[in-house]
Amino acid sequence: MKVADLHLHTNFSDGTFTPEELAERAQQAGLGTIALTDHDSLEGCARMRAACAAHGLDFIPGTELTADTQGQEVHILGYWIDEQSVPFQTELAHFQQVRQSRIHEMVARLNSHGIPIRAEEVLKLADCRAPGRPHLARALVAGGFADDYDHAFDRFLKKGRAAWVAKARMKSIDAIRLIHDAGGVAVLAHPGLYRNDGIIPRLAAQGLDGLECWHTKHTPELSAKYERMAAELGLVATGGSDCHGMSKGQPLVGTVRLPQANVDALHARRPVRS
Ligand code: AMP
Ligand code: ZN
Ligand code: FE
Ligand code: FE
């Protein structure tokens, strides 16, 4: 039976694999379909599509947006987005700009705490339009200011720590509309990480199409709970590993395996475009 992993990052945002490396790993893991969901970017999709074709994989273009619902940061995955959509690309360009300024702000905070790191170095290491905290973590490790990636987050980058700066968010209703207007479907990423299930019916009422029931950070009990919620709310149950390449040692790609039937159900939710 064909299986899918619908949540994957490359070096076009904060993953470490190139699209070609990711396709190779996905094929080795026995996947039949993969979606690329880099943060605030569709830029890797062209290369990912070609690499998937070369490896006999079905490809779904996507992205992961940061949104706000009732003061809660949520991540919304958009799938089958028209990469040529001007309104969508304009919005992405804005959020990419904000990410770059945020790196400067976080570096300034580190500097004021006596860590002599330079924003230019972090942005050079990131080498993409959507830099984020994982790049800063890698720069801190490379500079000897943290023992490893997780230590960098614990010491400096987690919410409430010295270098933490809030990330800009669009309103969830706007994120969902933006995705639909670009021909895509909207899925709430890793609901288990928010510890706030009350937002799910609210997002469903805003037009959400799917719920990421299976995710590396969900226990089997959490996944079962979200599968029930998805059925109750008429959402498609989806899943993905959220692989960021070698960030966490072993790559996660293929550790979540969604049946193709769920992918087909999600595909059927695509809006009819006028
Ligand atoms: P950003 O988009 O810049 O806020 O960074 C978010 C990314 O950082 C997530 O997608 C994760 O890959 C990673 N991340 C967030 N929190 C942690 C943490 N506590 N430890 C390790 N990685 C984290
Ligand atoms: Zn990430
Ligand atoms: Fe996320
Ligand atoms: Fe992600």
Image: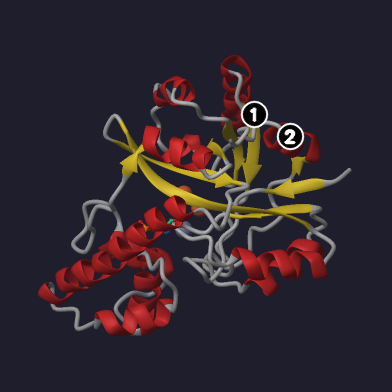
Pinpoint residue 60: horizontal percent, then vertical percent: 68, 52
* Disc 1 residue type (three-letter): Val
Q: 191 or 46, which is in the foreground? A: 46
**Are the two marked residues, 1 and 2, in contact with CB atoms closer than 8 angstroms?**
yes
Earlier sequence position, callout 1 versus callout 2:
1
Answer with left or right where residue 28 lies relative to residue 245: right
The local secondary structure at tag 1 comes to strand
Q: Residue 159, percent across and down?
A: 27, 51
Residue 269: which quarter of the image?
A: top right
Relative side of 22 to 179, left or right:
right
Secondary structure, mark 2, is helix
Q: Residue at x 64, y 37 (%)?
A: 238
How many residues crowd around disc 1 within 10 Å: few (fewer than 14), some, or many (20 or more)?
A: many
Residue wearing tag 2 = 262
Taking the view exactly as shown, the residue that stands out farthest to the right is 1
Q: Which mark is residue 107?
A: none
Residue 125 visible in the picture: yes
Front residue (pair 52, 224): 52
The structure residue drawn at horizontal position 52% and vertical position 37%, both measured from the top left corner, is 180
On the question of residue 189 being in view, the answer is: no
Q: Which residue is mark 1?
A: 236
What quarter of the picture does the N terminus occupy?
top right
- Identity, as a three-letter code, of the amino acid under mark 2: Asn
